[in-house]
Amino acid sequence: MRLSKLAPARDDRPAFLIVGLLAVVWIILYNNLQGIADWLTFTLLGLSRDSAVGQSLNFFIYDVPKLLLLLSGMIFLITLVQTFIDTERVRAIVEKRGEGVGNVMAAVFGAITPFCSCSSVPLFIGFVQAGIPLGITFSFLITSPIMNEVAFVMLLGLFGWQVALLYLASGIVIGVIAGLVLGRLKLERYVEPFVYDIRAKRTQQGLVQAKLTWTERFEQAAQATRDIVGKVWLFVIIGIGIGAVIHGFVPEDALTGIMGEGAWWSVPAAVLLGIPLYSNAAGVIPVVSALLGKGAALGTALAFMMAVVALSLPEMIILRKVLKPQLIAVFVGVVAVGIIVTGYLFNLVV
């Protein structure tokens, strides 16, 4: 009897078919984006792989659809799951455990999720809409891009497990402390109203009621996806466009020339230089390796990497559609201070 209640009704089968076909198309597109970008850039347009224009355009053609696909897919799944969950109860459970425990849970979850800064934004939006306290959601948003399995393996191979574990611990500590600070500042008023409007609309419609059909759940997930993606897609394109220009035209020698010094100001300089850039940890590792080869201290190189993956300008542009400038400024300031302290700590210990 219970199994029959979980099975889709006959009227829901067309909706399952449509969603299933779209999921197949999504997977095929996502798994072939790099090949499509390479073909368009280097075969169809005939640009050189070594040219700044070729690298920038390839980066743009690959990253824009990748992030839009991630954004739409995650929002759809998160909203679909939320139709089965009493988000007010979840919020109550998180608040009952207290800020500290909630921040640690969010930071650990961020550490094990393989997302870059921009692709962490959809989950951040989903947590805010679910009523999770803002400081706890920031702990996830900060830790998720900083803690990357590629960077962890690189540190493990180059410097041993002690340094790798120190990196892991520092990323989680930054996420927890920064989230606690941001939560205590009570900055919810600086979240754009449409985020809370969507949440209120879902509550009024009773989306968590078990009597909803699968078709209704799919429709609500699709509507939320259209609402959010429709508001941020232009910001995604602008942000990735800026990141693509920097990716192709900023010379590596310029970075190593500034951060290859052992001066006291090298760590904050590394953070300031990293903020305008955009990459994931795997993409910035060659630059980090070059910095280390030029004599940069480990903490300086890691501070640069953390700033690139956690405070990238494209991420800030995307977040601007969700957060007001005052909150973005506080977010950047708190995280930047945490990264600078971590950089100095590594330079002192290692």
Image (cartoon, rainbow, N blue to C red):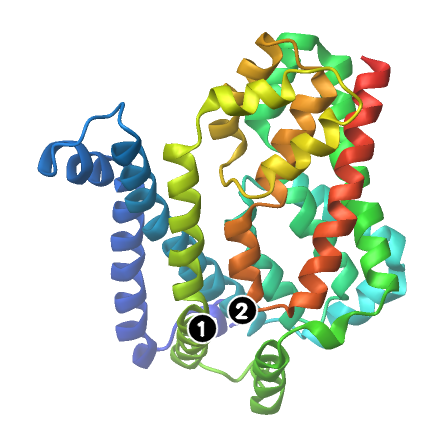
On the rendered structure, is 195 left or right of 91? left
| Residue at 71% over, 64% down | 327
One can see residue 296 in this view: yes
Q: Position of residue 220 (x, y in %)?
A: 45, 79
Q: Which mark is residue 177?
A: none
| Residue at 52% over, 59% down | 317
Q: Quadrant for residue 216, please give it.
A: bottom left
On the rendered structure, is 28 left or right of 243? left
Q: CA distance from mark 2 to mark 1?
A: 7 Å
The front one of 91 and 252 is: 252
| Residue at 62% over, 81% down | 193
| Residue type at numbered disc 1 | Lys
The front one of 144 and 186 is: 186
Secondary structure at numbered mark 2: loop
Q: Position of residue 50 (x, y in %)?
A: 27, 23
Quick one: label 2, few (<14), some, or many (20+) residues within 10 Å? many
On the rendered structure, is 250 left or right of 166? left
Label 2 sits on residue: 321
Q: Which mark is residue 231?
A: 1
Query: Does residue 69 lie above or below 202 as drawn?
Result: above
Query: Does residue 214 lie above or below 246 as drawn?
Result: below
One can see residue 102 in this view: no
Considering only order in the chain, which callout, 1 or 2, is on the residue closer to the N terminus? 1
Labels 2 and 1 touching (C-beta < 8 A): yes
Secondary structure at numbered mark 1: helix
Q: Position of residue 275 (x, y in %)?
A: 60, 42
On the rendered structure, is 262 left or right of 280? right
| Residue type at numbered disc 2 | Lys
Query: Does residue 248 lie above or below 153 as drawn?
Result: below
Quadrant location, the C terminus = top right
